[in-house]
Image (spheres, helix red, strand yellow):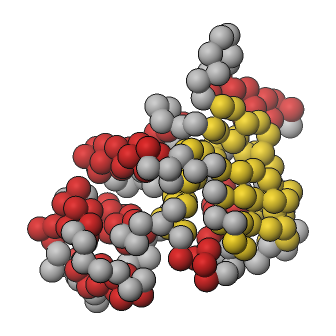
C-alpha cells in the first residue's frame, strides 16, 4: 500500500507538486500521466525519499523515510544509476549483500528475462542505454519489494524488454504488489492500468478508474481534454 498525503514540493518559486494526495492499493497498477514538466518525476522522487517536501508519504504503513519503508520499496529512476566499473553480476551481488538475500534463483530469472544473462561479465559502462535501463530494473526487483515505483520505465527499452516488463507488471499485480508508474507516453500504459491520475502544472486534475464501462470517455479523450483544455485557456 502506498499513501501520498498532501505533498507539496517547491523548487524556489516553482511549485512542482501542489498538495498531491492519492493511494495505491496492493494488487493495483496506478499511473501518473501528464505532459513534460507536470511534476511526475518530482512526486516519484518525493515518494522514493530523495527530496524534502511538505506532507507525508507512507509505504506499507511506514513513513517513507524509515528503514522499514525503504526495505519494501523498489524504485526505477528515469535515468539509470549504474556503476561504471561494476559488472552486471557485481551489481546483483551488491544488492544481495545490502538486502542480505539468499540465492534463490531469482537473479538468474530476472537477468534471463531481460536478456542480460549472457552479459553478466560486462561492465556498467560497456552497456548500452537500454541495457543499463534493464539492469536498473533488475536491481530494483531483485529484493522483491512490495511497492514498486517506476519513472518513465519504457523509455529506451526495446520491444522485447517492453513486453517482458508489461508481463511482469501483470504478474506483480496478481501477486498483490503495489505499483506506480509515471509516464508521458499514453500508449505505453493503455492496456494494463487500473487507475490513472492526470497531472498538469503540479496538480492532479483528473482521476480515472479502468473498467468503468458505459459511455465513459476513454483515457486518451480525458487526457487531451484536460491537457489541451489547459492550453486553450492560456
Ligand atoms: P515531469 O516529470 O512531469 O516532466 P518534473 O517533476 O520533472 O516534471 O518537473 C516539474 C517542474 O519542476 C517543472 O517546472 C521543472 O522545470 C521543475 N523542476 C524539476 N526539477 C527541478 C530542479 N531540480 N530544480 C528546479 N526546478 C525543477
Judge from the rendering whether residue 83 lies leftward or rightward of residue 220; answer left or right.
Answer: left
Any part of residue 176 in sight:
yes
Q: What residue is shown at x 81% (from left), y 59% (from top)?
A: 5
Judge from the rendering whether residue 100 lies leftward or rightward of residue 232; answer left or right.
Answer: left
Judge from the rendering whether residue 204 lies leftward or rightward of residue 222; answer left or right.
Answer: right
Q: What residue is shown at x 50% (from left), y 54% (from top)?
A: 177
Q: Note whether 78 is above or below 196 in the view shown.
A: below
| Rendering coords of residue 155 (x, y %) | 43, 52
Quadrant (top left/top right/bottom left/bottom right) for the C terminus: top right
Q: Note whether 9 is above or below 36 in the view shown.
A: below
Q: Residue furthest top?
A: 215
Any part of residue 10 in sight:
no
When asked about the image quadrant of residue 219, the answer is top right
Q: Residue furthest left?
A: 118
| Rendering coords of residue 124 (x, y %) | 28, 79
Quadrant (top left/top right/bottom left/bottom right) for the N terminus: bottom right
Taking depth in this image into account, of 63 and 126 the one nearest to the observer is: 63
Judge from the rendering whether residue 68 lies leftward or rightward of residue 7; answer left or right.
Answer: left
Q: Note whether 106 is above or below 181 in the view shown.
A: below
| Rendering coords of residue 163 (x, y %) | 31, 43
| Rendering coords of residue 216 (x, y %) | 68, 16
Amino acid at each position: 500500500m502506498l499513501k501520498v498525503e498532501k505533498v507539496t514540493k517547491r523548487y524556489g518559486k516553482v511549485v512542482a507538486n501542489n498538495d498531491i494526495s492519492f493511494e495505491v492499493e496492493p494488487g493495483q497498477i496506478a499511473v501518473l500521466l501528464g505532459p513534460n514538466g507536470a511534476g511526475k518525476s518530482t512526486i516519484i522522487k518525493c515518494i522514493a525519499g530523495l527530496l524534502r517536501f511538505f506532507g507525508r508519504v507512507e509505504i506499507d504503513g511506514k513513513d517513507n523515510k524509515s528503514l522499514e519503508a525503504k526495505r519494501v520499496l523498489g524504485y526505477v529512476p528515469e535515468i539509470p544509476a549504474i556503476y561504471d566499473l561494476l559488472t552486471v553480476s557485481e551489481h546483483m551481488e551488491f544488492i544481495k549483500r545490502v538486502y542480505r538475500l539468499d540465492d534463490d534463483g531469482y537473479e538468474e530469472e530476472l537477468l534471463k528475462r531481460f536478456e542480460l544473462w549472457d552479459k553478466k561479465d560486462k561492465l556498467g559502462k560497456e552497456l548500452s542505454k537500454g541495457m543499463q535501463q534493464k539492469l536498473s530494473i533488475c536491481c530494483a526487483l531483485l529484493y522483491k519489494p512490495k511497492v514498486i515505483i517506476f519513472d518513465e520505465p519504457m523509455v529506451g527499452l526495446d520491444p522485447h524488454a517492453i513486453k517482458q516488463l508489461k508481463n511482469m507488471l501483470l504478474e506483480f499485480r496478481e501477486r498483490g504488489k503495489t505499483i506506480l508508474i509515471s509516464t508521458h507516453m499514453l500508449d505505453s500504459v493503455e492496456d494494463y492500468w487500473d487507475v490513472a491520475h492526470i497531472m498538469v502544472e503540479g496538480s492532479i486534475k483528473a482521476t480515472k478508474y479502468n473498467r468503468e464501462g458505459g459511455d465513459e470517455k476513454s483515457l486518451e479523450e480525458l487526457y487531451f481534454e484536460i491537457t489541451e483544455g489547459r492550453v486553450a485557456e492560456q
